[in-house]
Image (cartoon, grey):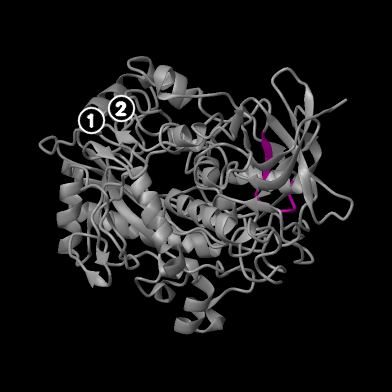
Amino acid sequence: MATQLKPVDVLLVGYGWTGGILAKELASTGLKILALERGGPRDTSPDFLEPSKDDEIRFAVRHELMQDVSRETLTFRNDSKQTALPMRQLGSFLPGNGVGGAGVHWNGVTWRFSPWDHEAHTRTVEKYGAKIIPEDMHLQDWGVSYDELEPYYDKFEKTCGVSGKAGNLKGQKIDGGNVFEGARTNEYPNPPLKQTQAGAMFDKAARNLGYHPFPAPASNASQPYVNPDGIAYGQCHYCGFCERFGCEANAKASPHFTVMPIAAKNPNFELRTNAAVQKVLLDSTGKKAIGVVYIDARGREFIQPADLVVLSAFALGNVALLLWSGIGKPYDPVTHTGVVGRSYAYQASSGATAFFDEKTYFNNFMGAGALGTNIDDFNGDSYDFAKYGFIGGGGIGASTSGGRPIQGRPTPPGTPRWGLDWKKATARHYLHTANISNQGSNMAHRANYLDLDPTYRDIYGRPLMRMTFNFLDNEAKLMKSLADVCATIGKEMGAERVDARTNPVPYSIVPYQSTHNTGGAVMGDDPRTSVVNKYCQVWDVPNVFVTGACVFPQNAGKNPTGTVGALAYWIADALKDKYLKSPGALVRA
């Protein structure tokens, strides 16, 4: 029998970037705030100290910081005619687990989405007309514009100490920065990271081709830095162990040492780890949340009453909780009704591997998670995507995140996977290979969605969430087109051989591609096509708010974390300045 606990004012379900930001920002309200995290506690010391923190087997191969799929997983299929089967091991994406979530093991790439990304439907129709949008595509505005979010992008960048170079400062375009970005109020908090050999060669080749290269924005501190909250960052020393690893120098922005220590100072804040929330409880009307049910590490069940519930878990986890809790109408692709699970999207990425002669050296073993040189000439509406027969685009760049000894072994296609010839190829190409990658957008489509599986259940007896997803014609064309651009840049860099590549089509959940899962609880200005309003407040249950990339109506050609962080600050202000002063719906349906 569940134990009833004392009520709290604000309940955060999941404690990563968004939960940490909200806990920090709401401290000034004086309300009782509780965060429930399904995983365990983590901190720089002792979890990420040298030399154990660079254990590639432990963290990169065995996924110690990730979701345990033997306990909680999902089922997958490419289309609704197939039978979905459980994902038995992590592959295409790597959801985090524990305090800090995916914000602990991320690379630190910190983009702002463009004005077009936030108003994709309106701006596309204005430029090309409505006929360009395929009938099965859910192209949708966010309900919040870039200009509204700009101060919050700025705030998150200062929190993270982002290293970069502005390309559009108050409307003035600046060569050397991203001239295609939305107008910024301020320069980045830190100067760019050091440019690598691959980055320098990419920069020159891109300029030769008429493009506009710039350093990638990185939450890897290029110098010692103290953020506005007084949190000190160490300087990145380019160890090459960012992705899938914690940072021993506190140089890579992570919530566990930035926002969470400030939240912990609040006497009205409490964190409970190893607390797996089962569902959100609703009152008899179904229009008000009254708390949650969770199970602790000993298997005990608790009812935690709360006045306000914020779903601040990973994107897929938030959608699953909505479905398990009966909040919002589940999406039905046949009738094209319902909203929860609608518009799931991913990242339509591609690229090229460039193999050089033995006189051209790339020190791939040195790197940082977000170290790279990019172009946005083919991203958003910075170019005429209609000419290529699709909607969207991608950011293209040469990154050097670190050639780790086990997984960082580039060899040309056709090389044996083991044996003497493989060893020779590894030795020949390790220092002489560069990757040019396209981070492609993914428009939402009618056939791609999330729902509950009728057959499989997790260890708690809940139906597994079912993912139905494939790369459709729009994304297949996008990946092929931008892979060709990547190959052209590789050739201009002087490579002996360039091999273009795309994500598998049809989509495969097996090889790692990106942990940029979006949609399923999207935001918008119409309850018929969105789960939450512009403040990320659930239309049907106004005292439930949802954070994270699950609210994106479609995915941009950029990493999502910068926008996730900006939205978290945006939600915090909406709660403080609007909701808490007058609880109820902030937008009329």
- Please state which of residues 383 and 540 is positioned toward the viewer in this rendering: 540
| Secondary-structure class at tag 1 | loop
- Please state which of residues 254 and 400 is positioned toward the viewer in this rendering: 254
| Secondary-structure class at tag 2 | loop
Q: Position of residue 95 (x, y in %)?
A: 55, 37
Q: In the picture, which quadrant includes the N terminus? A: top right
Which residue is pictured at 23% across the width and 71% down the height? 172
Instruction: From the viewer's perspective, tell me whether residue 530 is left or right of residue 267.
Output: right
Which residue is pictured at 49% across the width and 59% down the height? 476
Instruction: From the viewer's perspective, tell me whether residue 512 is left or right of residue 534.
Output: left
Q: In the image, which disc is placed on residue 237?
A: 1
User: Would you identify the image quadrant in which residue 240 lies?
Assistant: top left
Instruction: From the viewer's perspective, tell me whether residue 307 is left or right of residue 200.
Output: right
Where are the magenta residues, as a range? Answer: 73-82
Q: Position of residue 181 (x, y in %)?
A: 33, 65
Which residue is pictured at 63% across the width and 71% down the height? 525
Cβ atoms under marks 2 and 1 closer than 8 Å: yes
Q: Which residue is mark 2?
A: 249
Say if residue 494 shows up in the picture: no
Disc 2 residue type (three-letter): Ala
Q: Position of residue 434 (x, y in %)?
A: 25, 42
Count of numbered marks:
2
Give the distance between the C-alpha atoms of the residues marked 2 and 1, in whole angstroms: 8 Å
